[in-house]
Image: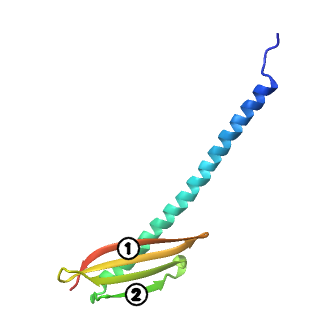
Amino acid sequence: MRRGFTLVEILTALVIFSVAILAFLQGMGDSLSHQNDLISNEHAAMLAQNILEEIYYDKDLEEGDNEGDFEGADAGYHWESLVQTTDTDKLMEVKVWISWNQGSKELDYELVTFMKAE
């Protein structure tokens, strides 16, 4: 009586191992893709906060919209802002949108807050 594995057992184990490795690699690829999306969203949130701060420190908070493109390291990002009056006296609704392209996808981030008009 011989000891060891048959060819069928070895091939079956190899197929199972290959499927497990492929699933692991697919998961790693998806994880990296999601990580890039999160980094881009975090960067867009920071840019939106910067635009919001510029609006806040502009002493004449008036109703209207504005837009522009970032320069330098942030050149791929576009921003839009909208300031609207509310039903509450001297309270303005401020919206900031950041949009950018990542690969073949167009992504955006929106930040909404309220500010007191001086």
Specify the quadrant of the image occupied by residue 30.
bottom right
Quadrant location of the N terminus in the rendered image = top right
- Residue at 31%, 86% (x, y): give it: 58
- Local packing at callout 1 (Cα closer than 10 Å; few below 14, some 14-19, many 20+) is some
Quadrant location of the C terminus in the rendered image = bottom left
Q: Is residue 27 above or below residue 106?
A: above
The secondary element bearing badge 2 is classed as strand
- Local packing at callout 2 (Cα closer than 10 Å; few below 14, some 14-19, many 20+) is few
Q: Which of pointers 2 and 1 lies earlier in the amino acid sequence?
A: 1
The secondary element bearing badge 1 is classed as helix
Q: Residue furthest left?
A: 89
Q: Residue furthest front?
A: 87
Q: Residue 86: which numbered mark, if any?
A: none
**Callout 2–callout 1 Cβ contact below 8 Å:** no
Q: Residue 66: which numbered mark, if any?
A: 2
Q: Residue furthest top?
A: 1
- Residue at 37%, 72% (x, y): give it: 111
User: In x, y percent, where is residue 9?
Assistant: 76, 26
Judging from the image, the colouring scheme is rainbow
20 lies left or right of 100: right
User: In x, y percent, where is residue 15?
Assistant: 73, 36
User: In x, y percent, where is residue 41?
Assistant: 47, 66
Q: Tag 1: residue type?
A: Gln
Q: Is residue 109 above or below residue 58?
A: above
Q: Tag 2: residue type?
A: Asn
Residue under numbered circle 1:
49
In space, the residues marked 2 and 1 are separated at their CA atoms by: 15 Å
Q: Nearer the viewer, mark 2 or mark 1?
A: 2
**86 and 56: which one is in front?**
86
User: In x, y percent, where is residue 22?
Assistant: 67, 45
- Residue at 23%, 81% (x, y): give it: 86
